Image (tube, helix red, strand yellow):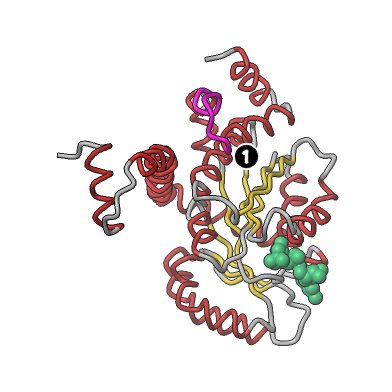
Amino acid sequence: MTPKSEALLTGLKSQDPRSIGRAITAVENNNEEAAAILAELDQDLIDNVLVLGITGPPGAGKSTLTASLISTMRDQGQRVGIIAVDPSSPISGGAILGDRIRMMDHALDEDVVVRSMATRGRLGGLCASAGATVRIMAASGCEVILIETVGVGQSEMDIVRLADITLMVLAPGFGDDIQAMKAGLLEVADFLVVNKSDLAGAEALCMDMEQIFSAKQEESGIKRVIQTIARDNKGINALYDTVNKFADFISSRGIKQQRRDKALDAETLDWILEMLRPKFIQAMKEATGKADPRVRAQELINTLISIH
Ligand SMILES: Nc1nc2c(ncn2[C@@H]2O[C@H](COP(=O)(O)OP(=O)(O)OP(=O)(O)O)[C@@H](O)[C@H]2O)c(=O)[nH]1
Ligand SMILES: [Mg+2]
């Protein structure tokens, strides 16, 4: 362990915002410091953190809901981490800017740790770096971590799988988006949040969703379709209470552990690919054969890795 990584580790454990930010950047750059820091994080804190995935179509109110949930969590004295996964390019930055403005309410609060990540313009490793960011935030004392993604692309969905509990946010007037997602809703979401319940069509959407979620609801005895008006902070406390009840339910049944185990496998695989990529890029430069790509890939694997 270098003196620099030692200092970062001490800093993040004492909740110093700059050290936390630098540690996450080290992970994103996957340098030596990152490995040293990640090996020394407090596993109990990581085991006990609650990771909530918040997803749904663009404009459903995810960021408004997230900001409102943070207020409730802060009222309860919880330290909160937020990972905002931004599908737009880092250059245009539109969505990030929007999210940042909404986070301004919490900008001066040192017990709210915010990090944005772009999905575009990178060659994978998103699951690995989001997972490592969760760990760093947890090790810095965050008790709850919210991951906000726009639920459209596969990479966003993969990140949601890092969550212990996933909330899908929908709103009236998203008919086409909802039809497109319907098949995957049950698989992905633990909770269906019908936001913008001040708008016409909310009741009908709720009834529709309750039908889809009725079996899940019966299984745990916990309501799975919840109405909110995030813009006015309405329904947020009830949502918070219900999610916490569900968190106890999945912990006591061993479901949280099962989900963590799966996430760990996905992250490990992501790290493996991340670590191998530069080695294979180098090998390709050296072996410029004209073979079919499938054949060439096998040859390179045989050369670089001995699997018997
Ligand atoms: N009527 C009404 N509008 C809301 C409510 N919640 C959020 N909005 C508005 O809906 C718009 C989109 O909200 P966001 O929170 O940015 O939605 P988002 O899902 O984070 O959007 P993206 O990050 O772009 O995918 C904003 O203009 C909000 O003010 C609500 O409960 N009722
Ligand atoms: Mg948003």
Residue 67: horizontal and vertical position, in percent? 76, 55
Q: Is residue 85 left or right of residue 31?
A: right
| Badge 1 residue CB within 8 Å of ligand 2 | no
Q: Is residue 278 left or right of residue 74?
A: left
Residue at the image point whose x is 73% and y is 50% from the top:
70
Residue position marked by numbered label 1 in the rendering: 143
Residue 78 within the segment the image draws in magenta: no
Ligand 2, seen in the image, is in the quarter at bottom right
Residue 47 visible in the shown view: yes
Residue 33 within the segment the image draws in magenta: yes
Residue span colored magenta: 28-36
Residue 148: horizontal and vertical position, in percent? 64, 56
Residue 200: horizontal and vertical position, in percent? 75, 86
Residue 277: horizontal and vertical position, in percent? 42, 42
Count of numbered tags: 1
Residue 235 visible in the shown view: no
Q: Is residue 107 left or right of residue 280?
A: right
